[in-house]
């Protein structure tokens, strides 16, 4: 314990020095940091070895690097004091390589003529041992320059500390960043990914060469979505960090519609309920994985060796599962060898980092690292003790290591090499720490130039401006506003050719700044854990096919749903559609409801409808019959039967009936505005002329009968003037009605898209219902008047009388059109047109048959009756 007393006010540093539990190999150790008087006294249990590396210079770089994995409490037998012992160096040899590269990088910077002219760069580095308390102690030792940390005090005078590098883990980094932020020191982390560090208000001087967990998990989520893996399992640590990362991952996956089937929280404890049931903990994990339908499992966050040890008994379950390591694969190599069945065929996401120009590629440089040459390098001595079982020069330390690792140490030959140690010089090594040193050196160089030009500024301003031209990415990289360095990600595929011979294949690349269609690009094929080497499916429910939409199951995950067909008028042209899309008004879904196609147009076509052909044939047939009758009447122009029935009215009636038959063709074919206007009007006028002619015939019969009486005044009405006047007057009224209708609201083409699904009914809209029913009503009025007069005149002498035939024709006419009205109102589309045509043909044929067939019978079959004598022979 070191005490210091001074008069100045010391800033209160939120060190986070609270009680915490550490878990290792089934043991729980509680280590407390005690603060008696926080303003002037700090007490942290020291480690057995501080692992300090120092070289003074004009400008200093401080650092807290993780080389050993973590600390455990250990009471040393020679003095009985409780200290923390840094352990698990064996699994972190690449981290010692990072330290070595840092020292070499600084040496090369000092030798380079391009950096820090007339200044030397020094360093003061500690191994944080993966423990935030050790990291905090190390930073305070660097700031105070003493063996024991003294907050807000330096025992070595003023030190030009430019900034700090470190740490690897987020927990350590946050702890030291809180202190460095108070003092205004810039900090560059080479591995921390906690999103809280992106807060520039709380950490304005913090930078990191990796992206935060948010960016990392965003890439993971896009990878899962790309392959359609919407149903996954998660394995994480059962601690605060694991829970925090799990919640972040869960929220990002949820945004992409990915659901979590299960979450396994790995701990070294045996759960209480398992202990009571006397069931091994891995059996619970096994049951969870076996019951899950997810074929993809994500290892969330940092994966320590303890997690892998917990999963090794479950290796047989991972043979058919695709494992995704969400943390840097290269940092997990040291324990993958011991779980080949688990990690073989797994995927990993690793951020691409720029290679440092100071990373030593010459193995001869590494071979020089030996305890005999660097006797003060305690980490190097520990490597020799743990890997080569060599005795150190410290008997107490030898006894501690033999007791701790249950190993026997020997005197070594001195020919041992660090490059022979497994994982030290592996091909997947990524020089993060020397790259961080290079960034800080560039910032210092720019700062030196600015100061020479009398431009002032703090270190973090120059760190923001450091740029790297990365030609493979076709991009100039620099720190973002939140202090992150955004680079590409590698999607790697892990295979084992044989025991402990692992290969990492770059399966794909993720470019965060690329457009969506180029965000993920896959450059090679890999072997999947399926029979046909197909991409495995990991879904709660099979994809809804196009033409179907998803309907969530009550009380289930959003990824578990039923598939129901799209409703009428809707399509879904993609799989797993949330909603179906309405087709435009003029289109309709195809049979599979996957695309909108043009609706079928419905009208009485000349070519496609047999009923149109039938109506056309009937219309032409009756037209020809009418034409023959007209020719017959012209041929027998002077015959008594033709003359006795008012030849002019008969010819006018035949012409109007003939035109009525021809008007049927206005109702056939695709309706347009002009045909819509001509339809009812042509029919209405021609039928009005026909009925007016019959009315005139009936009136002439009555007048002729009245005129036969001696001295009758009706004689002056005999002649064609009366009949022509009747026809002209009655027809003119219908013409006036039609013209008024056309002027005010004429009929027009109408597209009915609602009555029949999938069909566009092309029809004529009357425009004005009053106009339509006025035309029909007026024809009915003429027919009714003709019927009444003909009925009253039916008993007049046969020589002059057509009344009974007119009666039958009007009876038929009225019956047809009265029944047509309800049929017209109750039908839609082309059926309505069929009703109209049927009414026209029937009523026209009725007039033709009732009026002219008896006369044709007399002319052609009974010419003996077609004589004046025979006609005058009838009794008056």
Image: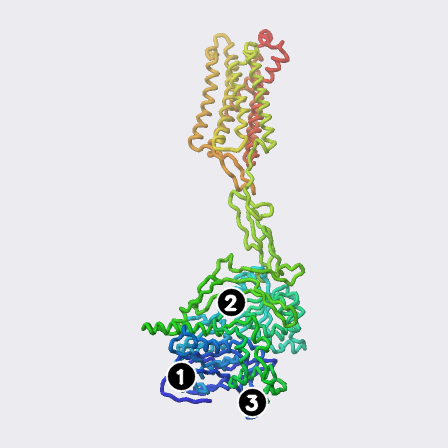
Q: Is residue 527 visible?
A: yes
- Name the spot of residue 111 as percent of width and height, x first: 43, 76
Indicate the secondary structure of the residue bearing disc 2.
loop
| Number of other residues with Cα within 10 Å of mark 2, as a class: few under 14, some 14 to 19, many 20 or more | some
Separation of marks 3 and 2 at Cα, in angstroms: 42 Å
Q: Single out the residue that lies furthest toward the left.
A: 454
- Kindly indicate the quadrant of the structure image that contains residue 792: top right
Q: Nearer the viewer, mark 3 or mark 2?
A: 3
If you read the primary sequence from the N terminus, does the residue marked by circle 1 or circle 2 appear first? 1
Separation of marks 1 and 3 at Cα, in angstroms: 37 Å
Residue bearing the label numbered 2 = 352
For residue 713, which numbered disc appears in the image?
none
If you read the primary sequence from the N terminus, does the residue marked by circle 1 or circle 3 appear first? 1
Instruction: State which quarter of the image contains the C terminus.
Output: top right
Residue bearing the label numbered 1 = 152
| Number of other residues with Cα within 10 Å of mark 3, as a class: few under 14, some 14 to 19, many 20 or more | few
In the picture, measured across the screen, residue 172 lies left or right of residue 553, that is left
Indicate the secondary structure of the residue bearing disc 3.
loop
- Name the spot of residue 697 as percent of width and height, x first: 52, 17
Residue depicted at 57% across the width and 22% down the height: 623
Residue depicted at 61% across the width and 62% down the height: 526
Q: Nearer the viewer, mark 1 or mark 2?
A: 2
Residue bearing the label numbered 3 = 393
If you read the primary sequence from the N terminus, does the residue marked by circle 3 or circle 2 appear first? 2
The front one of 741 and 263 is 263
Indicate the secondary structure of the residue bearing disc 1.
loop
In the picture, measured across the screen, residue 440 lies left or right of residue 319, that is left
Q: Nearer the viewer, mark 1 or mark 3?
A: 3
The front one of 798 and 135 is 135
């Amino acid at each position: 314990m070191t005490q210091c007393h001074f008069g100045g006010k010391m800033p209160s540093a939120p060190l986070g020095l609270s009680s915490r539990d550490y878990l290792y190999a089934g043991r729980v150790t509680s280590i407390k940091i005690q603060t008696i008087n926080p303003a002037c006294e700090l007490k942290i249990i020291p480690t057995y070895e501080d692992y300090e590396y120092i070289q003074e210079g004009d400008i200093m770089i401080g650092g807290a690097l993780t080389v050993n994995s973590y600390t455990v409490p250990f009471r040393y037998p020679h003095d009985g004091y409780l200290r923390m012992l840094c352990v698990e160096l064996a699994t972190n040899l690449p981290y010692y390589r990072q330290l070595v590269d840092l020292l070499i990088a600084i040496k090369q910077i000092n030798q380079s003529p391009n950096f820090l002219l007339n200044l030397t760069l020094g360093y003061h580095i500690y191994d944080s041992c993966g423990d935030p308390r050790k990291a905090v102690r190390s930073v305070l030792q660097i700031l105070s320059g003493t063996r024991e940390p003294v907050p807000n005090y330096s025992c070595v005078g003023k030190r030009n500390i430019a900034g700090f590098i470190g740490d690897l883990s987020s927990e350590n980094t946050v702890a030291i960043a809180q202190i460095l932020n108070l003092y205004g020191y810039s900090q560059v982390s080479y591995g921390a990914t906690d999103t809280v560090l992106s807060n520039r208000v709380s950490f304005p001087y913090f930078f990191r060469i990796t992206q935060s967990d948010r960016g990392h998990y965003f890439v993971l989520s896009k990878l899962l979505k790309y392959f359609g893996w919407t149903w996954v399992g998660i394995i994480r640590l059962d601690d605060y960090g694991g829970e925090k990362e799990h919640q972040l991952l869960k929220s990002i996956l949820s945004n992409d519609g990915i659901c979590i089937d299960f979450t396994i929280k790995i701990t070294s404890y045996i759960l209480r309920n398992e202990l009571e049931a006397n069931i091994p903990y891995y059996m619970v994990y096994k049951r969870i994985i076996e019951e899950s339908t997810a074929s993809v499992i994500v290892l969330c966050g940092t994966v320590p060796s303890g997690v892998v040890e917990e999963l090794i008994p479950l290796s047989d379950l991972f043979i058919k599962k695709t494992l995704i390591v969400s943390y840097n694969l290269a940092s997990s190599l040291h324990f993958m060898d011991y779980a080949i069945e688990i990690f073989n065929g797994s995927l990993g996401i690793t951020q691409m980092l720029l290679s440092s120009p100071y990373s030593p590629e010459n193995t001869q440089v590494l071979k020089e690292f030996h305890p005999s040459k660097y006797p003060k390098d305690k980490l190097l001595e520990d490597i020799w003790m743990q890997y080569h079982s060599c005795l150190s020069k410290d008997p107490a330390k030898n006894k501690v290591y033999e007791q701790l690792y249950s190993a026997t140490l020997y005197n070594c030959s001195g020919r041992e090499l660090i490059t022979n140690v497994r994982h030290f010089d592996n091909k997947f090594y990524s020089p993060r720490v020397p790259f961080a040193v290079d960034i800080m050196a560039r910032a210092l160089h720019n700062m030196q130039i600015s100061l020479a030009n009398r431009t002032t500024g703090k270190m973090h301003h120059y760190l923001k401006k450091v740029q790297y031209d990365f030609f493979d990415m076709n991009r100039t990289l620099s720190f973002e506003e939140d202090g992150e360095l955004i680079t590409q990600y590698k999607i790697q595929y892990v295979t084992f050719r044989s025991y402990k011979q692992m290969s990492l294949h770059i399966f794909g690349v993720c470019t965060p700044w690329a457009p969506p269609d180029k965000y993920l690009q896959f450059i090679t094929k890999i072997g999947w854990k399926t029979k046909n080497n197909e991409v495995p499916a990991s879904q709660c429910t099979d994809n809804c096919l196009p033409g179907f939409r998803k309907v969530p199951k009550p009380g289930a995950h959003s990824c578990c749903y039923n598939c129901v067909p799209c409703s009428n008028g809707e399509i879904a042209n993609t799989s797993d559609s949330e909603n179906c899309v309405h087709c435009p008004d003029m289109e309709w879904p195809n049979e599979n409801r996957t695309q909108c196609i043009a609706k079928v147009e419905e009208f009485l076509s000349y070519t496609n409808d047999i009923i149109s052909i039938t109506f056309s044939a009937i219309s032409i047939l009756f037209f020809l019959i009418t034409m023959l009758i007209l020719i017959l009447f012209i041929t027998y122009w002077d015959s008594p039967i033709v003359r006795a029935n008012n030849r002019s009215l008969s010819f006018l009636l035949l012409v109007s009936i003939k035109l009525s038959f021809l008007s049927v063709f206005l109702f056939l074919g695709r309706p347009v505005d002009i045909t819509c206007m001509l339809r009812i009007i042509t029919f209405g006028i021609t039928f009005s002329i026909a009925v007016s002619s019959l009315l005139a015939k009936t009136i002439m019969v009555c007048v002729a009968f009245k005129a036969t009486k001696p001295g009758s005044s009706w004689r002056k009405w005999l002649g064609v003037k009366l009949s022509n006047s009747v026809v002209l007057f009655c027809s003119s009224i219908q013409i006036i009605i039609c013209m008024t209708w056309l002027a005010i609201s004429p009929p027009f083409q109408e597209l009915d898209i609602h009555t029949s699904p999938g069909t566009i009914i092309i029809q004529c809209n009357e425009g004005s219902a009053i106009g339509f029913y006025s035309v029909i009503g007026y024809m009915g009025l003429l027919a009714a008047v003709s019927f009444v007069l003909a009925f009253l005149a039916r008993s007049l002498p046969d020589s002059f009388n057509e009344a009974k035939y007119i009666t039958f024709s009007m009876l038929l006419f009225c019956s047809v059109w009265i029944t047509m009205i309800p049929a017209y109102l109750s039908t839609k589309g082309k059926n309505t047109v069929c009703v109209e045509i049927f009414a026209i043909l029937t009523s026209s044929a009725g007039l033709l048959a009732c009026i002219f067939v008896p006369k044709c019978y007399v002319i052609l079959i009974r010419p003996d009756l077609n004589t004046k004598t025979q006609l005058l022979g009838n009794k008056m």
